[in-house]
Amino acid sequence: MAISLKSTDKELARYRIEVVLRVVFAVVGGYVFTTLSAIFLSYSLPLSKSDAVITASVLSFALFTCAIIWVFAVKSLLRAWLGLVVPSLVLGVLILTIQFVRGGL
């Protein structure tokens, strides 16, 4: 008795590639976004330097979790990628601006 599968081998391979890409986006993109967010928060929180760094580090765990959930929640890979790259670029520019204003560059 032959089993009839609704998906073809090509569709299955495409699905597997998409899952792998989402994992890569979630891990790498989430890490970059989280790191930049923690740096930005440590600069901008109105606390002492040590308290700001600790608070930003603790918040980074929640941000990384949210980034991973975001990548797997959206429908398209392009939206997942843009959802991590655009905020990361904005945070990077803000960090460089803060460092330039403070005289760190």
Image (spheres, rainbow, N blue to C red):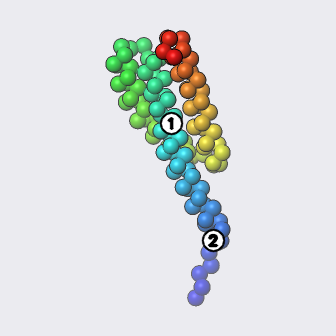
What residue would you read off at disc 2? 9
Residue 69 seen:
no
Looking at this view, is 104 or 75 the one in front?
A: 104
Q: Is residue 63 left or right of residue 6?
A: left
Q: Quadrant of residue 92?
A: top right
The Cα–Cα distance between marks 2 and 1, rounded to whole angstroms, is 34 Å
Front: mark 2 or 1:
1
What is the quadrant of the N terminus in the image? Answer: bottom right
Residue drawn at point x = 63 percent, y = 71 percent: 9
Determine which of the numbered discs, if any, sits on residue 40 in the image. Answer: none
Classify 20 as above or below 1. above
Q: Percent from the top left, x then y, of residue 99?
A: 51, 16
Residue 51 seen:
yes
Q: Percent from the top left, x then y, of residue 56?
A: 41, 26
Q: Percent from the top left, x then y, of residue 7?
A: 64, 70
- Point out the residue furthest to the top here: 102
Residue drawn at point x = 49 percent, y = 29 percent: 36
Total label count?
2
Classify 20 as above or below 71. below
The local secondary structure at tag 1 comes to helix
Q: Percent from the top left, x then y, of residue 4?
A: 62, 79
**Three-letter code, disc 1:** Val
What residue would you read off at disc 1? 32
**Three-letter code, disc 2:** Asp
Classify 31 as above or below 11. above
